[in-house]
Amino acid sequence: MPYKNRGALPDSFTDNLPRHAEEIYKEAFNSAWDQYDLDEERAHRVAWGAVKQKYHKNADGDWVVGKSDDS
């Protein structure tokens, strides 16, 4: 189901992603949810893809702005 706000995201997201990445995830998920006829799995894949366009995990496991060095 679509997320009404960032606070509705699972704790595993809000505990690890920067605020801006959470917004990207929420907006991409909600858009994909509508676009792909309520296909939750696909909406999650689209949302993670959107986050990974702007963020990557660094060597410490933190999400930071920028593309991964190995991409």
Image (tube, rainbow, N blue to C red):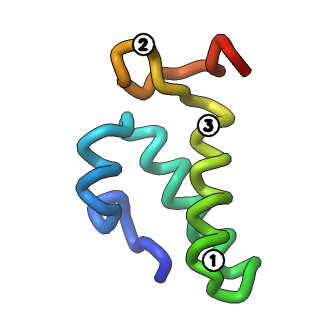
Residue at horizontal 24%, vertical 56%?
Answer: 11
Side of 34 relative to 27 (left or right): right
Q: Is residue 59 above or below residue 13?
A: above
**From this viewpoint, which residue is outermost toward the bottom?**
37
Q: Is residue 10 above or below residue 71?
A: below
Q: Position of residue 3 (x, y in %)?
A: 43, 72
Q: Position of residue 26 (x, y in %)?
A: 49, 60
Which of labels 3 and 2 is toward the front? 2
Q: Amino acid at mark 3?
A: Lys
Q: Are marks 3 and 2 in contact (CB under 8 Å)?
A: no
Q: Amino acid at mark 1?
A: Trp
Q: Of marks 3 and 2, which one's residue comes earlier in the chain?
A: 3
At mark 1, the secondary structure is helix
At mark 3, the secondary structure is helix
Q: Residues within 10 Å of mark 3 (few under 14, many from 20)?
A: many
Q: What residue is disc 3 on? A: 52
Question: If the image is split into quadrants, where does the C terminus sit?
Answer: top right
Q: CA distance from mark 3 to mark 2?
A: 15 Å
Residue 43 lies in quadrant: bottom right
Q: What residue is disc 1 on? A: 33
Residue at horizontal 37%, vertical 65%?
Answer: 5
Q: What residue is disc 2 on? A: 59
Q: Amino acid at mark 2?
A: Ala
Side of 26 relative to 31 (left or right): left
Which of labels 1 and 2 is toward the front? 2
